[in-house]
Image (cartoon, rainbow, N blue to C red):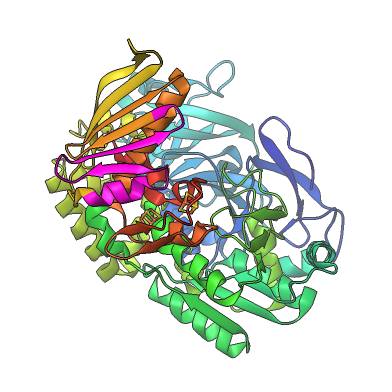
Amino acid sequence: MARPKHGKEIFRWCDECGSLILGEGCSTCAPSREFSVSLPADIRPCTGTGVDTVKEVFERKFGTSSFLDGRLIFLNRIAGEDRTDEIVVEGEVIGTLRFEIVSKQFNLDLKLAGARMLAPLATKGLVKVKQPSGHLKGRSLPGTEIVEINGDFEIGDPLIVHSGNLICAGVARASSKDAVRSKKALGIRDAGKGRIKLPERDLTWMDFVRCNETHLRKLESKAVSDIRSFLGNRKENEITVSFSGGKDSLACYALARKAVGDVTLLFANTGLEFPETVEYIRSFASKNGVRLIEGSPPTTFWDQFPTFGPPAKDFRWCCKVCKLAPITSIIEDNYSEGVITLEGNRIFESFARSRIGFVERNPFVPGQINLNPVREWRAIEVWGYIWLKGLEYNPLYDKDFQRIGCYLCPACLASEWETTRRTHPELWRRWNDDLLQWSKEVCVDDEFVEHGFWRWKNLPPKMRNLAETLELRMPQVRTEQAQMKMIKGASPCTAGGFSIEGVISLPVKRDFSRVAEVLKVLGKVRYSDEYQIALVRKGDATLKVFGGGQVTAIASTREEAEDLFDLGVKSLLRAQMCSECGICVKSCPREALEISGGLKVDESRCTHCGKCIESCVVAHYFDKLVA
Ligand code: SF4
Ligand code: SF4
């Protein structure tokens, strides 16, 4: 793969075969040429109803989409308000597909290559202008320059603009009705000469595989070699694959089969999977004669929803409760000696995954070693490999789902949520009704739900701007949970050292004895039920937690006082908001915890190592739970 330059990545294209080329050259024929797409360049194929989506936009804007028939269409996700994909056809980026959150429709930004392809075919979205002096690119033209308009358009619509022998990619700054009288009728994004002639094609994705077979086999060979090298003479003799029903885990399955033969599939069924995914995973295991271990969380998402509220991109409590909990149970129940698990994580998926290594360990799942054999593969390489191996994939991909997982995941795009509304109306309604009910309880506008703002605790700038444009009434930080009022920031005590004091108001009030119990993981607790006070001494430091929610920490340094105060707040929240997910129980190396009418700590075993606090979903998100 060529190296990126100026925010672009260079790929190759074979004009003979009409296909993207992933390696140095086409496996079947002549030399290929270069073209570029924007980073991160995780190119993927456009398949199934995804093709219909692209065609519908071209049909709506230019009255034609037949030029796409028989061709391989590739999409390249780039940054944007919501789903934003560069569209690659015949080795050219012809436009950018954009999902608009407010209109809930796809729109198109046309590129010059798209204008040059469509110019002889389009029946609308066409404007002829006078030949102005000087360059056209980047200019805004008044209506007085317009000679002819073909077809209606609205502000923001893409246009093909003809000017003399130039063809331009333009955008409407006024509607077709007002354009002629407007001072700013249209903008010219780019201009060039000549049409792009399109050869006849009748291609399938197996043509893409044929062109790239050499490259795909090299990828497989390297990944298999990496897996085998790691295994060496290790004691673990069983390889497992974390099988989510997605394409990346499917590729991992095929690599594991090639590397070691027998594998076991692990499926953490969150209870929020699409029915097709559950059905696919079970039938895939059965058809391929592979052992499948399926785990489910000890408590459901719906049980925890009243406590935590909707999960958010920056508050994914559901992952810990519904996904991590079943995985830890599967490992503990089946692999007490440890296990190696192949995971389909890829560096192109997100910033968080951009630095994953081949070998990773999840601190919350002791005994499991994770290998990421496809971490450097692009989506198109994963798909090429799946087609090369003839693997059956999840049918949801052919319904324009790009991410297989929980159907109400806050990481989903608004466009995906619209797809869910269309394909799974019952699931969509259930979650939408719950969100609307919740929005009433926390006094935010229904549009908060309607436009997907619930997916953030703290809105990012792009969503804040959109909220302002829509004049929505909404909190910038959700406050449906606990609230903290600082009485005194860390300040010197008259008796020496530093103290810090605050009050936490909680929506849930469980018996105070639970707080005293949870505090035992910090140190020896002195507790009075009558006065509703629990006191923990840690060396010279003292932590006091009161039934009314007051937390006071005193220590010899400011940092120690602040750390102890945080631990006090986390303990209070753990006691009052515990979801009984059991993750902390499994992460305790001393088996000092159990859940029995709340969390119980065996003081004779606890060494106050703090591992249970690190693993706890409530403690992890304590700053998000407290406003
Ligand atoms: S994880 Fe550490 S602090 Fe927590 S209960 Fe176990 S021994 Fe105690
Ligand atoms: S205290 Fe333990 S059981 Fe409760 S939410 Fe935290 S990790 Fe889960």
Name the residue rendered at 65%, 42% in the picture: 37
What is the quadrant of residue 133 in the picture? Answer: top right
Name the residue rendered at 56%, 24% in the picture: 137
Say left or right for 356 vs 174. right
What is the quadrant of the C terminus in the image?
A: top left
What is the quadrant of residue 498 in the picture? Answer: top left
Name the residue rendered at 28%, 24% in the picture: 501
How far across and down, in percent of the image, does residue 181 sit?
29, 23
How far across and down, in percent of the image, does residue 108 sit?
45, 44
Query: Relative to 144, is 436 above or below?
Result: below
Say left or right for 8 vs 107. right
How far across and down, in percent of the image, does residue 191 sit?
59, 30
* Magenta segment includes 517: yes
User: Number of marks in the image?
Assistant: 0
In this rendered view, identify the residue nearer to me: 149 or 92.
Answer: 92
Say left or right for 540 vs 357. left
Query: Relative to 8, is 254 above or below?
Result: below
Query: Relative to 570, is 233 above or below?
Result: below
- Can residue 311 be seen by looking at this rendering? no
Say left or right for 273 vs 504. right
Name the residue rendered at 23%, 58% in the picture: 432
Magenta-highlighted residues: 513-541
What is the quadrant of residue 399 in the picture? Answer: bottom left
- Can residue 50 be seen by looking at this rendering? yes
